[in-house]
Amino acid sequence: MTTSTPSQEILLQIRDLNKSFGGLHAINNVTMDLPAGVITTLVGPNGAGKTTLFNLITGHLTPTSGTVHWLGKSLKGVEPWQVARMGIARTFQDLRLYSQMTVEENIMTVMERSSWLWQGGGAAATQRVNEILDETQLTEKRHERAVDLAYAERKFLSLARIMASQAKLWLLDEPASGLDPRSFERFVTLLRAYAKRGITICIIEHNLDIVIKLSDRVAFLDQGKLLAQGSSEDILKDPHLAAIYFGERA
Amino acid sequence: MIAYLQNIAVLFCINAILALTLNFIMGYAGIFSLAHAIFFGVGAYATAYIAMHASDSLLLCMAASAAISAVLSMALALPALRVRGEYFVAASLGLQVIGVTIFSEWKSITGGLGGMIGIPRPKLWGYTFNDDTAFLGLALVVLGVVVAIIALLVRGSFGRSLMAIRDSESAAQTYGKHVNAIKTLSVAVAAGLAGVAGSLYAFYITFINVESFMLETSILLMAMVIIGGTGTLFGPIVGAALLMSLPAALTYLPFLPPTELGSIQQIIYGLAMVLLMMFRPGGLVGGRSKEKSA
Amino acid sequence: MLFTQLFINGLQTGALYALIAAGFSLIFGMTRIFHAAHGATFTIAGYIFYECYSVLHLSWPIAALAATFAASVFGVLLDRFVYAIIQRHEGSFFTVFVASFGMAIIVQNLIAMIFERGAVTVSTPLSKSLEMLPGLYVAPIAAVVILCAVIFFMALQWLLTKTSMGIALRALGENPTLIEVYGLTPRLLSQYVFLIGSILVVPAAILTAATSGLNPAMGNHVMLISIAATIVGGVGSLRGAAMAGLILGMAENLCLSVIDPQWSEAVTFVILFLFILFRPGGVYGRAVVS
């Protein structure tokens, strides 16, 4: 049961999505909607298929059956770089920062999407880069190489990249794991700010703190099946789901 | 003496252009090509043919050499880049081998094993570069232009795209980079400019044959890039200078038997490559810059 | 009759290529190291055999043993002292490949300096061609080549499937971290892989010395074949590499019935290109697309 109000536009529509790897049925008939401006958290035990679901949306994997529609257009057969240009961006659990490039370069290159030999950014681009550096508090580190940053700074750089991508849908894979409390608060504030600007965010998280503090909605995935969707209150209070999450099977 | 130094200087310019362009794809894009000598050769043969049969205009011949090399490289790159880097090495090795065979056999265009003799010196706006000193000036200007082009590309958005692909291809794709197009374009630029070097070479030496474009040359170029330092702008230039002065330096060591100098040279490159990779993978200019990813 | 002649030559060449390719594929498939010095191992084995047998006039078993010793020592030491150091701090494909390549250049030129630059052959009583049928010339050594290849492959098969070390080696290719769980060290196993891979080229080197002869630059051709066969056969498949080696050897000889000899090396690469274009996974390998 979805709790989207009639005024919210559904941006991402997943219908009867299936993905099998040989004998393993990783995603099993998942149907899900992501409305504009809503922060949804995807929870579930390890191996439930959460990252696989992300991969299916971004085009890194092709579905065995089922459809994914973004802004009304089908994503079938669309390459990851094309999906990105259509307005969907994601982060990785292992970050995959451009390690030898500076913080500034990491952000700039996300904004430079064309394959042409020369792209002028102009003043607007420079301003945006500065804004992002400011919002993620990385301004002082702008000329440091990504590989030399501290852990929390790397997490924020990962977020900075997605902020630079001008994407309307953010798929974040455990973005806040391992953050100290202060950084965590900053992180939450930043995400909320962007959600208010109309960005749709879907987060994979194990950290229940985030789930409670951030999510408007929660989707519970187990063994490839979407067991429930609803407000965080409803989902987290359900003892049946809690049992699955913490390892006891009904 | 002056003539000797001038000669070395022109050859240095040509080798520097080749090393810079090879570094563009190896050091920045992470594409390992063992076929760079072929693009050099294609440029040389193209200029030789046009200069001897149609026009000795500098600009026309260089443009043609650049274009033909670039187009040929895209024919190689488009299919081969779809698969992993190791496969590109193999494919480029194949191109190098086949290229040499074609250069040796296609008598009507390349003159076969005998090569092409009597290539005229180029003409620019009425002036013919018959004077060697003038040619050196030309070579330096071309080198300068190539350095400028590469510096602009590398320091701009295209360079960032290449480095992003090198550091994390999956992330680059995820953030909207059309990786295949970018890689293919970089190979085209490198090959095109290598073709320009070939054009210079043909015009200067006025005689070319397949011996200058064999696997040994591709290996020498790779050594220049590696020893000088990949992924830096001046590394290849340093590498070119060092490796070109090696033969001359060796002749000053009296205890070395002169017949074996060629082999000794090669042993020195080989040793330099092995030791550098073990202790200083970034090359002489780059240092220890290659580290594991963030 | 020309066709039969080429066919038999092709079998002989193919058998040698299969052994060479198997060695390279074993090393690459299991350690992911692009051992560009594999050709150098071959050259060393061949020249040591030549030195012992034709120059020092030792008996052929001793010469063969010396060649095996030299090849194994080279392969294992290279892994232990060069590759291990590189892998410890950085170990990217590029760095290992270049170091390997540098080693190959050193070996090629050292051999050129120590021995003559031109080709040398080892003449044995079996090398002389006999006219078996009108127009068909076969040397008995061809039979030796093919027999040798078969024996070595059977031994390799036994080693990899029936011995515990062999099984551990195959696991190394799949999942190096799992090895440590079982108390084995990937480093040590890697050295075994280099040992076996290097030994595999020795019979090929000796037989090549006795048939077409040796020259210091032959390592390049060996590398070309190794790489081409590994890709065509499928990365990670030993059977594939061997089969591909055989196919390439056959193709190289059979094509002589229609084209000039200088194009025969190109034929190998045309086959390679076609596979890269249409079937990059090779005949037996897993499909690899980035």
Image (cartoon, helix red, strand yellow):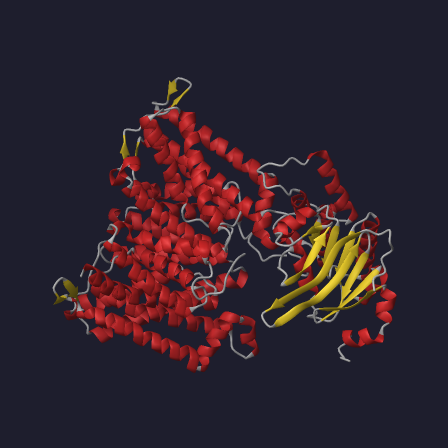
Dividing the picture into quadrants, the one containing residue C120 is: bottom left
Residue at the image point whose x is 46% and y is 36% from the top? B193
Q: C233 left or right of A188?
A: left
**Residue A184 in view here:** yes
- Classify residue B31 as left or right of residue A139: left
Q: Residue furthest top?
A: B126
On the image, the x and y values in percent for residue C250 come to: 29, 62
Residue C66, x across and y down, in percent? 27, 71
Q: Count the numbered circles shown.
A: 0
Give the side of residue B168 with respect to residue B52, left or right. Answer: right
Q: Quadrant of the N terminus of chain C?
A: bottom left
Q: In this orientation, which residue lies closer to the viewer: C58 or A57?
A: A57
Q: Position of residue B89 (x, y in %)?
A: 44, 53
Image quadrant holding the C terminus of chain C, namely: bottom right
Q: Residue at x 34, y 77 (%)?
A: C154
Residue C226: image x %, image y %?
37, 61
Tell me: residue A66, above or below residue B126: below
Query: As drawn, is C88 to the left or to the right of C65?
Result: right
Q: Is residue A92 among what the camera can see?
A: no
Q: Nearer the viewer, residue C212 or A25?
A: A25
Residue C47, quarter of the rendered image = bottom left
In the displayed structure, would residue C139 be above or below residue B183?
Answer: below
